């Protein structure tokens, strides 16, 4: 598994981001005296909503990405290719997080935030397809 060190570190970083965002979301809701669960004032200019959504986006994106990464390692996928996909996804998720939390025009739906989210989803799709190809060849 040594050849997959970069992929493992990248995957663990994605998990850590989700965990940190969970704590950040919970603390932010507590400080605002908001109830646990979804923020009902669902507007892009509501910072608490954006914090909650960036956390949920992170959680929603993690499982469909993490499972193929683990399977790719078990199947013996080319380590450099896997590391490139993992770190590309990680960088896209970090930029998405920063844009969404910053707010403003770029964070609104259909803007840069959406491009980043779709780009990371496409990296996940490529990962799934390459992992499937590795499994059948």
Image: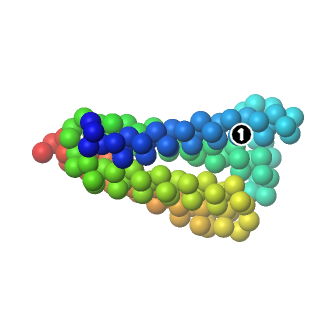
Please state the horizontal and vertical placement of residue 110, each as a whole percent of the image: 61, 65
Is any atom of residue 45 visible in this view?
yes
Left or right: residue 64 versus residue 76 is: right
Please state the horizontal and vertical placement of residue 86, each as a whole percent of the image: 39, 50
Please state the horizontal and vertical placement of residue 32, each as a whole percent of the image: 86, 39
Left or right: residue 29 versus residue 21 is: right
Q: Which residue appears farthest toward the right when viewing the image?
A: 33
Say above or below: 102 vs 70: below
Say which of 79 and 21 sits in front.
Answer: 79
Residue position marked by numbered label 1 in the rendering: 25
Where, quadrant-wise, is the N terminus in this rendering? top left
Q: Colour scheme in the image? A: rainbow
Left or right: residue 117 versus residue 6 is: right
Identify the residue shown where x is 79% and y is 58%. 45
Identify the residue shown where x is 49% and y is 43%. 13
Say which of 86 and 34 sits in front.
Answer: 86
């Amino acid at each position: 598994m040594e050849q997959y060190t970069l992929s493992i570190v990248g995957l663990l970083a994605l998990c850590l981001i989700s965990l940190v965002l969970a704590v950040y979301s919970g603390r932010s809701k507590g400080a605002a005296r908001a109830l646990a669960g979804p923020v009902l004032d669902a507007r892009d200019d509501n910072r608490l909503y954006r914090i909650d959504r960036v956390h949920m986006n992170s959680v929603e994106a993690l499982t469909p990405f993490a499972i193929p990464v683990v399977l790719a390692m078990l199947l013996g996928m080319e380590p450099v290719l896997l590391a490139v996909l993992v770190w590309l996804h990680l960088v896209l998720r970090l930029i998405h997080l920063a844009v969404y939390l910053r707010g403003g025009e770029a964070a609104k739906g259909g803007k840069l935030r959406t491009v980043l989210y779709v780009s990371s989803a496409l990296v996940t799709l490529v990962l799934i397809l390459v992992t499937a190809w590795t499994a059948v060849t």
